[in-house]
Image (tube, rainbow, N blue to C red):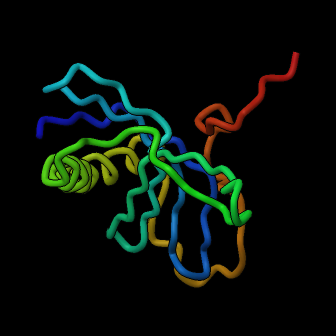
Amino acid sequence: MNVEIVDFYPCIAIKKHSVIVGTIHVYLKDFDIDLRGIRVINLKNRYSIQLRCDCTTDTEDGSKVRYPIFSFQNKETGKDLMDSIRDELNIFFPKWCAKNQFNPDLKGVKGLDPMLKFDPKLSRSYVAKS
């Protein structure tokens, strides 16, 4: 599948475990679709990818139910999408780190810390003060 990663938006870094969590904006060229808010967890250059989903409560038993906001009917197409995103992340993420002067090797620092090395405008949670 032909995908382009448009940008990465960092949220947090768990330095104790060398984990970076954020979201990506992906453009699916074959379908002319923009997907935003895809959660990415980077653990030592391995990527866990989660497409957006929503939660609700089952009216019968009260349990939480998660359902995808976007999915392909054909499971193979969905798997191809995830594989393509991972392949692109292997190219995109090191370039992104270099461009934003971020060292993804977070070893030796304890705790859960905001990614203070970034300009806050890079984060999707940034709110401009007027």
Identify the image quadrant of the C terminus: top right
For residue 36, above or below residue 40? above
**The quadrant where residue 29 appears:** top left
Question: Which residue in the rendered view is the most extreme toward the front?
Answer: 60
Q: Which of 64 and 123 lies nearest the eye of the viewer?
A: 64
Q: Residue at x 49, y 54 (%)?
A: 102
- Left or right of 107 in this view: 61: right
Q: Which of 68 and 129 lies nearest the eye of the viewer?
A: 68
Q: Which of 107 and 13 lies nearest the eye of the viewer?
A: 13
* Residue 86 screen position, x and y as percent: 25, 56
For residue 74, above or below residue 31? below
- Left or right of 61 in this view: 45: left
Q: Residue at x 42, y 64 (%)?
A: 42
For residue 117, above or below residue 30? below
For residue 129, above or below residue 79? above
Q: Residue at x 74, y 63 (%)?
A: 62
* Residue 64 screen position, x and y as percent: 66, 61
Q: Residue at x 53, y 73 (%)?
A: 106
Question: Which residue in the rendered view is the most extreme toward the right?
Answer: 130
